[in-house]
Amino acid sequence: MQQGQRAHNTLTLALTSLPQVPIKDEVARFWRHGYYAAVSYVDSNIGKVLTALDDLGLADDTVVLMIADHGYQLGEHSMWEKYTNWELATRVPFIVAVPWKPESHGLVSTVRGVSRSI
């Protein structure tokens, strides 16, 4: 059995019984590697979009927004999934770039999630 299939089988077992199943270091490294590879891939594609805006002369006139769901916990608090209430698991990235508002560049703030029933 290949390493990827072995890790997938372990993930399936673990997700049906977490957090009771201890995760082997080898599997944890494999999962983290995959997660960081996905983040790197997204980062690369965002860079391509920003480069295209520059190349087309649109960067100074375009608002760029990036939002994503919260990521996986990667072993923090012995958790490996997305459905926890630990603060780390509830943070959501939301990046706004407004070229004509330089005072906002590098500004970091915390916004609490808001849930609204319809």
Image (cartoon, rainbow, N blue to C red):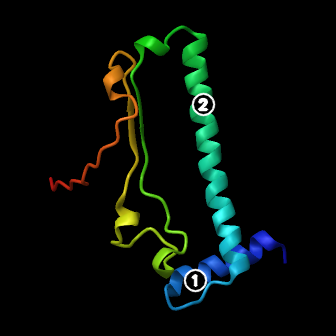
Q: Quadrant of residue 100?
A: top left
Q: Position of residue 13 (x, y in %)?
A: 60, 84
Q: Quadrant of the N terminus?
A: bottom right
Q: Secondary structure at mark 1?
A: helix
Please indicate whether residue 79 sits to the left or right of residue 9 in the image.
Answer: left
Q: Secondary structure at mark 2?
A: helix
Q: Earlier in the sequence, mark 2 or mark 1?
A: 1
Q: Position of residue 22 (x, y in %)?
A: 59, 89
Please indicate whether residue 1 sits to the left or right of residue 76 in the image.
Answer: right
Q: Quadrant of residue 65?
A: top left
Work out which residue is located at the far top of the displayed protein and give it. 57
Q: Which residue is mark 2?
A: 47
| Contact check, label 2 and label 1, Cβ < 8 Å | no
Q: Position of residue 33 (x, y in %)?
A: 69, 62
Work out which residue is located at the far left of the displayed protein and give it. 118
Name the residue type under label 1: Ala
Disc nearest the viewer among 2 and 1: 2
Q: Which residue is mark 1?
A: 14
Q: How many marks?
A: 2
Residue 78 disc label: none
118 in relation to 108, above or below: below
Name the residue type under label 2: Gly
Q: Position of residue 35 (x, y in %)?
A: 61, 59
94 in relation to 20, above or below: above
94 in relation to 24, above or below: above
**Residue plotted at (69% across, 80% down):** 25
Instruction: Work out whether residue 84 or residue 14 is closer to the camera in this orientation and state it.
Output: 84
